[in-house]
Amino acid sequence: MAGGAAAPPLRGRAGPAGPHTALLALAANVTAAGVGLGGQESALDRTASIRWAPRRAGHILLIGVIAGATLPAVQVLGPELAPTTVILRNTAGLTGLIALGAVLCGAHHAWTLPTTWLSYALVVPPPTGIRGEVCAWMLQPPDTPAATATAVALLATGTLLHAVKGPGT
């Protein structure tokens, strides 16, 4: 922006289709896939003769790719809902949260972690400064380093923990 002023957070934009719509669509895509992060029987997963870690990590990354690719595909046909960098950042963070949710709550309740954080970010006014950028990372403008770092940390942590530990029970 001109004059060195920081870009306002995405929170204040109005319109029928905007960043909130994009965020809700991403969250719906990711949480719908979360139930597939666990098998029918966790004892079978633990005793299987195949290596699960690469498959689990690949599954998480595939969820992120599919969930993140749907919005740009839809935006080709209509208005831009959010900048591509925001879509990538939010997809990464929400995918990490769904993986963490699967580890902590089990695959059938993996949706609780991203849904809770999303609800918090949309409803509760964020604190000021860096804490606010971390707490409301999914609503920040694309050039916010703390928001990007938070999303990348969530993706890395969630993918690693899910790959190593697998879904909780």
Image (tube, rainbow, N blue to C red):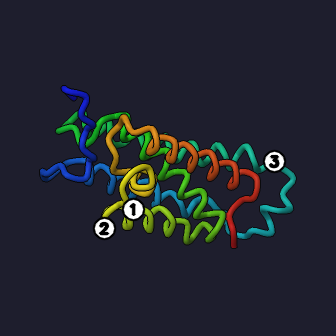
| Mark 3, residue position | 51
- Nearest the eye: 135 or 159: 135
Q: Residues within 10 Å of mark 3 (few under 14, many from 20)?
A: few
Closer to the eye: label 3 or 1: 1
Which secondary structure, mark 1? Answer: helix
Q: Quadrant of the C terminus?
A: bottom right
| Mark 1, residue position | 118
Residues tagged 3 and 1 counted as in contact (Cβ below 8 A): no
N-terminal label among 1 and 2 = 1
The CA distance from mark 3 to mark 1 is 33 Å
Q: Quadrant location of residue 83? A: top left
| Mark 2, residue position | 123
N-terminal label among 2 and 3 = 3
Q: Is residue 2 above or below residue 21?
A: above
Q: Residue at x 22, y 38 (%)?
A: 80
- Nearest the eye: 51 or 126: 126
